Image: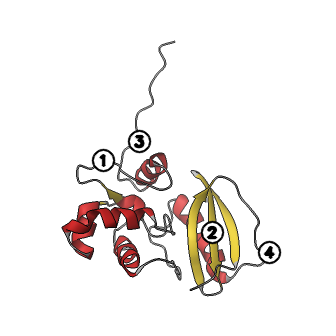
Amino acid sequence: MIVATHSTYYYSPIGIIGITGSEEGICSVRFCDIAGGKTPELPQSMIDCVSQLEAYFHGELRQFDLPLLPEGTTFQKQVWEHLKLIPYGATTSYLSVSKAVSGPKAIRAVGAANGKNPLCIIVPCHRVIGSDRSLVGYAGGLWRKEWLLQHEGVLQPKPEQLSLF
């Protein structure tokens, strides 16, 4: 078990992202309500993580290249590895991931593993949608999933509604 010994925060356009890691790599990247304490000196992997998140949100990065150390079951890790194969600007369904990882009957387990992904954005669980193309399930909130998919060009922004008054 890898223990996250360092922490920092990235202030993204869609909220604060808490990042934890160690000298060996990144343990978690999660949305959070408030920023807590930061580690004064960060390992290079965490500096790179912040830099790559910055580039992603500026539209300059489409694929992350970081040492990742997520904690989870063997099945969860299989799902997360498969999620990393979903290219920027594309989506897949929970059913497709289920078929690729374990078989169609594992769709609920895939959904649960997707929801437990400790590396949001880096491991792109936001790119998994319902078979009917609906935006279902995202630990960071559906509005963030929608924003990320718009940012990647998968969804078109909704037109702003004009006020009648």
Q: Amino acid at mark 1?
A: Ser
The answer to which of marks 3 and 2 sits earlier in the sequence is 2
Q: Is residue 81 above or below residue 105?
A: below
Residue bearing mark 2: 19
The location of residue 80, given as percent across then percent down, is 40, 73
Disc 3 residue crowd, few under 14, some 14–19, many 20+, Cα 10 Å: few
Q: Nearer the viewer, residue 69 or 46?
A: 69
Disc 2 residue crowd, few under 14, some 14–19, many 20+, Cα 10 Å: many
Task: Say the numbered circle drawn on residue 34.
Answer: none
Q: Nearer the viewer, residue 40 or 76?
A: 76
The location of residue 81, given as percent across then percent down, is 38, 77
Which dot, 4 or 3, sits closer to the camera?
4
In the rendered structure, the answer to whether residue 89 lies left or right of residue 20 reads: left
Report how far apart the C-alphas of labels 1 and 2 lie in the structure.
29 Å
The answer to which of marks 4 and 3 sits earlier in the sequence is 4
The answer to which of marks 1 and 2 sits earlier in the sequence is 2
Q: Amino acid at mark 3?
A: Pro
The location of residue 60, given as percent across then percent down, is 51, 64
Circles 1 and 2: CB distance less than 8 Å?
no
Report how far apart the C-alphas of labels 4 and 2 lie in the structure.
13 Å
Circles 4 and 1: CB distance less than 8 Å?
no
The location of residue 47, given as percent across then percent down, is 66, 75
Residue bearing mark 4: 40
Residue bearing mark 3: 157
In the rendered structure, the answer to whether residue 52 lies left or right of residue 124 reads: right
Residue bearing mark 1: 134
Q: Amino acid at mark 4?
A: Pro
